[in-house]
Amino acid sequence: MRQANLSTKLFIAVMSLSLTVLFVMPVSAVKEWRESKLERGWQIWISAALFDKGDGLKPGKSEKKLANQAEKPWLAEDILIAKVAGGSADYEFKSPVAGKAYIWGRVADFRGGGQSWFIALNSDNIADAGDSLIIDTHGPVWRWSGGRDKPESQSPTDLKKGTNTVRIQPREADAGKEALFDIFMISTEAFQPTDEDYEKAKEGLPVEPAGKLATTWGTIKHRF
């Protein structure tokens, strides 16, 4: 009996320490993402529809009629739709490294080509301020598109180790010419991604919020 009690106390002590470590770990603002290590680098893949803050842009679930007209398949569960120019969507994520960044987007449109998006890393200077890439669309078929006139689609700004931000903004969009965004990828190495690369990437593991940790800890104590 004494041995059982000692084992129980040891288990609780270990779990308490583990949950404390989880509690203090930083939590990425993006709730769902994928990661990979292709070309000897690190990549993060984020659904454009899962923005942290948005102004004037809508996910497909809010624009079901338009979303239903978009060609399938999407890689993400939903897509981002720009009905008019302007507006923006912001994303926050964690990077394990700092340095050069290469950005690609899986995009489409309802015009037949000629639409485009701005995408900026770690900068509030959007539009043509020099910190963003221009991602061109090529019609209704989804394509991975890199930065216009930017060799290897290198971002003008670098990745930071720790918290980073991304901002997306449509350059052109209008009724019947809506621009669409599925997934964007940020990589520490230069290469053009494929749908298969995304499918093979592993889902990120967000830390549970404090409330969930408290519930988990209460359950553990109750069992013993």
Image (spheres, rainbow, N blue to C red):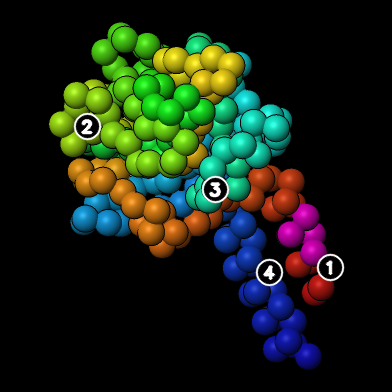
Distance (Cα) linking label 2 and label 3:
28 Å
- Earlier in the chain: of badge 2 and badge 3, it is 3
Q: Residue furthest front?
A: 112
In this rendering, is residue 85 above or below 112?
Answer: above
Nearest the camera: 27 or 115? 115
User: Callout 3: few (<14), some (14-19), or many (20+) C-alpha neighbours within 10 Å?
Assistant: few
At horizontal 64% and vertical 31% (from top left) the residue drawn is 66
Q: Disc 4, disc 1: CB below 8 Å? A: no
- The residue beneath circle 4 is 12
- The residue beneath circle 2 is 154
Where's residue 127, x and y in %?
A: 37, 11
At horizontal 63% and vertical 26% (from top left) the residue drawn is 58
At mark 1, the secondary structure is helix
Q: Which mark is residue 222?
A: 1
Q: Which mark is residue 181?
A: none
- The residue beneath circle 3 is 72
Label 2 sits on what residue type?
A: Gln
Q: Main secondary structure of the magenta part?
A: helix
- Earlier in the chain: of badge 4 and badge 2, it is 4
Give the left or right position of residue 28, taking residue 224 as reference: left
Give the left or right position of residue 214, taking residue 199 as reference: right
Q: Disc 4, disc 2: CB below 8 Å? A: no
In this rendering, is residue 4 above or below 117?
Answer: below
